[in-house]
Amino acid sequence: MPDLDGQIERFLGELRRQNVSAHTLRNYASDLGQFMEYFTIRVKPTVEEIDALAVREWLGHLYSQRLTAVSMRRKLAAVRSFFKFLLREGVVGTNVARLVRTPKAPKSLPAVMTAEQTNTLVEGVAADKLERPYPARDLAIFELLYGCGLRVSELVGLNLDDFDFAERWVRVRGKGRKERQVPFGSKAAQALERYLVQRSPARREERVLFLNHRGGRLTDRGARGIVKFYARMITGDSSIHPHSLRHAYATHLLSDGADLRAIQELLGHAQLSTTQKYTQVALNDLLAVYDKAHPKA
């Protein structure tokens, strides 16, 4: 039977065949690499030699390293997926990682920009006062992130063929390769029209929407860098990232009366409970207004 590192390589190979995103593959490889490193300090074990107690000891080691509960949960999820694969392949008889309790993570609400703050940021990008090489592209990025609530991986994965410019719909490939249709507004349409006139792909047949300086597909890292640059220069807040605009999109829709299930569909959430965190954000905003304005508060 292959030892632990051999089985991990088999699992990563299966993920590649499933065509998971590069970001997901990188996280699995990192988390499982650390898992293997913990168990191979003395001797390389086989997967059959790792039981639930050993997994608990590994979690204890992570705790001693002062990892957050969120990080520990992610790493345990990677190990569970690994053992699920081994169980399906008949290598082990039990998914021992499922026998270990998931560390509790503190409930945290996403920090959300107000509509005024978000508009100030996007309008600052539109003002084009920072002498950037591709201002039209950058504005289209912001208009789609905020106008459609896209994840950064969804944004950079867009192709020209995904757009229906007449009806203003875009096909988005989300997590798990699930597709959804998302509308975009007039501001995004204008930004896209301006960008497409200037778009210069390295190859004429290149169909990707957002290009980097070499004329190829913009990476998620590149998009994050663009958002962070403008956020720092316009608002002075370098903590703003692409997901901040997704949070703002959902929260502002909810605050203006949009149905929660409609927002779930627009965001591509598999479960309504994921979307419901925005109700708490909106409630907190209402309480802040109440505390500030009501004479009996």
Image (cartoon, rainbow, N blue to C red):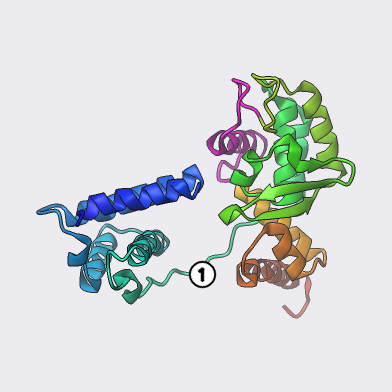
Query: Dot 1 lies on which element?
Result: loop
Which of the 4 image quadrants contains residue 122?
top right
Highlighted range, magenta: 211-240
Label 1: which residue?
107
User: Does 253 sit left or right of 226 as displayed?
Assistant: right
As drawn, 177 above or below 286: above
As drawn, 259 above or below 14: below
In-front residue for pair 27/108: 27
Which of the 4 image quadrants contains residue 204?
top right
Badge 1: residue crowd in 10 Å (few <14, some 14–19, many ≥20): few
Residue 137 in the image, given as x and y percentages of width and height: 72, 30
As drawn, 219 above or below 262: above
Q: Residue at x 61, y 72 (%)?
A: 273
In-front residue for pair 168/147: 168
Q: Residue at x 65, y 67 (%)?
A: 275
Residue 114 in the image, given as x and y percentages of width and height: 72, 54
- The amino acid pointed to by label 1 is Lys
Residue 268 in the image, given as x and y percentages of width and height: 67, 59
